[in-house]
Image (cartoon, rainbow, N blue to C red):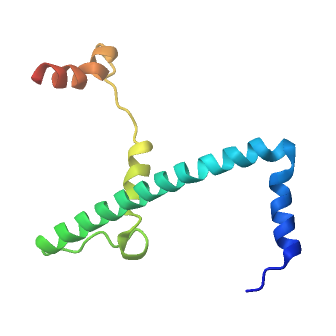
Amino acid sequence: MIIYTTEVEYINSFYTLESLKEVYGIIWMLVPILTLVLGITIGVLVIVWLEREISAAIQQRIGPEYAGPLGILQALADGTKLLFKENIFPSRGNTRLFSIGPAIAVIRDQ
């Protein structure tokens, strides 16, 4: 690949503009953060996928293979299902107490 000096000068001219120096700095500050977040997210998805595959092999059953290729989108499908899950409250009774009941049970057990 040949890089011409005019292309390098054009790329470097972006940094020399005074008004864009702050934007350039912010972009280079966000790149490592976004890279780290993306890496952690992909790592968690791989670990969840491996857990499902290994559990399926141990139980001698078919693993999650219907959501995307080899089931790698199953965690995304589970998260989407949880996000859109309907909250069910009793029609009669104290809805506030009903919603904070699980938190009370967890706090009391500790």
Residue 87 placement (x, y as % from top left): 38, 33
Residue 95 placement (x, y as % from top left): 33, 17
27 and 83: which one is in front? 27
Direction from residue 48 to residue 38 in the image, left or right: right
Residue 94, quarter of the rendered image: top left
Residue sitting at x 24%, y 70%? 53
Residue 28 placement (x, y as % from top left): 64, 51
Direction from residue 47 to residue 57 in the image, left or right: left
Residue 11 placement (x, y as % from top left): 81, 64
Residue sitting at x 23%, y 64%? 51
Q: Quadrant of the N terminus?
A: bottom right
110 and 39: which one is in front? 39
Q: Quadrant of the C terminus?
A: top left
Residue 40, quarter of the rendered image: bottom left
54 and 80: which one is in front? 54
Residue 109, quarter of the rendered image: top left
Residue sitting at x 44%, y 58%? 39
Residue sitting at x 53%, y 48%? 33
Total numbered labels: 0
Direction from residue 15 to residue 67 in the image, left or right: left
Is residue 84 positioned above or below 7 on the image?
above
Is residue 30 positioned above or below 73 on the image?
above
